[in-house]
Amino acid sequence: MTAMDKTAYKGVYVFVEQREGTIQGVSLELLGKARDLAEALGEKVYAMLLGNNISGQANKLIAHGADVVICADAPELGGYTTEPYTQAVCQIIGEYKPSIVMIGATTIGRDLGPRISARIETGLTADCTKLEISEERDLLMTRPAFGGNLMATIVCKDHRPQMSTVRPGVMRTLPADANRKGEVIAITVNFNKSKFRVRLIETVKEKKNLIDIADAKILISGGRGMANPEGFAKLQDLAYTMGAEISASRAAVDAGLVSHDRQVGQTGKTVRPDLYLAVGISGAIQHLAGMEESGYIVAINKDKNAPIFQVADLGIVGDAKQIITLLNERLKK
Ligand SMILES: Cc1cc2nc3c(=O)[nH]c(=O)nc-3n(C[C@H](O)[C@H](O)[C@H](O)COP(=O)(O)OP(=O)(O)OC[C@H]3O[C@@H](n4cnc5c(N)ncnc54)[C@H](O)[C@@H]3O)c2cc1C
């Protein structure tokens, strides 16, 4: 077998995830990172925009960093199902030969990414937290390994494209620039419908009254030190007073006090609020991975040696239940 000609592969491509026509924040974050990588390589940023009646969104992608938007508009791409999306992205990859493909590590991205990489026979590094270009112009994909105890940098040397998924909240969105110019290319996907095994009949949405913790400006996060109904009721009271959202460590999620979509950390969400209040959380490395980029961190813990204090801007040592009660009373006044 001859070695592949890597120079034939160019451009940093981002799969743009949309749900009911709304572009998801993670795709804009990835366009921001794609710009850095493309500039390091001297190449362009391409957005792969798939959906039904979706082409009107192309300008938004250009404003956020895309040089070229490849748009596949088709009824088959209305709601997400694996096979039509895989076929569409594989067709784009086959025709345009990207050097790098980035996908958000959402439920859709985690389904789509592995399917594409297997079909086109390349590697995929999931849940990357850092992406850089090496001196040899390869993509250095860094992600937590061994339960978050070390960071592994993975290189896909012999195959192209180099594929990675990145969790929402890890990269930064570039501010929209309405003056940016770009090109929009409309493509027709040649679907092989005989492979379509799943049909979307209806989408039933879970009822949610709360804001996604990844979008919250203030988060009050409870851990095992508050993991009883009385403790979380106090946090909820304080959240109400402060206009904050509740999040939690895995210990509190496992105790059944909060749903998993409120978990912060390596196997939860990455958050970056202006204020993160960590209450009765020890600060395990897997938790820190999801919150250490927060604007201002306040930690309350009865153990003065708790690792959470190493990332906190303000640390309060004491019994969290008493402190939260007093804080709430004071703020209400
Ligand atoms: C592969 C893997 C993935 C993981 N992913 C995640 C993840 O995404 N998110 C996550 O959070 N964890 C994750 N974990 C688990 C993580 O390692 C920790 O076990 C977890 O974060 C501990 O939660 P905690 O800090 O609430 O509990 P603990 O570590 O038990 O800490 C409780 C803290 O509360 C303090 N405390 C107790 N009572 C009081 C009180 N009355 N007042 C004040 N302080 C008090 C204690 O001093 C202690 O510091 C993961 C683990 C693995 C192996």
Image (cartoon, rainbow, N blue to C red):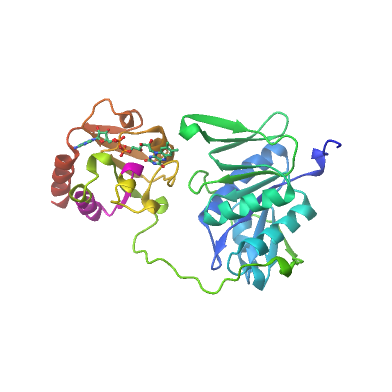
Q: Is residue 187 above or below residue 146?
A: below
Q: Is residue 18 above or below residue 325?
A: below
Q: Is residue 73 visible?
A: yes
Direction from residue 134 to residue 231 in the image, left or right: left
Q: Residue furthest right?
A: 2
Image coordinates of residue 272 in percent, x first then y, are: 41, 44
Nearest the viewer among 1 and 213 is 1
Residue 37 inside the magenta-drawn segment: no
Direction from residue 215 to residue 313 in the image, left or right: left
The residue sitting at 44% across, 68% down in the picture is: 205
Direction from residue 71 to residue 5 in the image, left or right: right
Q: Quadrant of residue 123?
A: top right
- How many marks on residues? 0
The residue sitting at 19% across, 39% down in the picture is: 320
The residue sitting at 20% across, 47% down in the picture is: 231
- In what quadrant of the picture does the N terminus appear? top right
Q: Is residue 279 visible?
A: no
The quarter of the rendering in which ligand 1 is drawn is top left
The residue sitting at 71% across, 38% down in the picture is: 41
Image coordinates of residue 201 in percent, x first then y, are: 55, 74
Q: Is residue 59 above or below residue 169?
A: below
Image coordinates of residue 188 in percent, x first then y, are: 75, 67
Image coordinates of residue 93 in percent, x first then y, are: 74, 53
Q: Quadrant of residue 250?
A: top left
Residue 235 inside the magenta-drawn segment: yes
Name the main secondary structure of what is drawn in magenta.
helix
Nearest the viewer among 214 and 110 is 110
Residue extent of the magenta highlight: 233-251
Q: Quadrant of residue 37?
A: top right
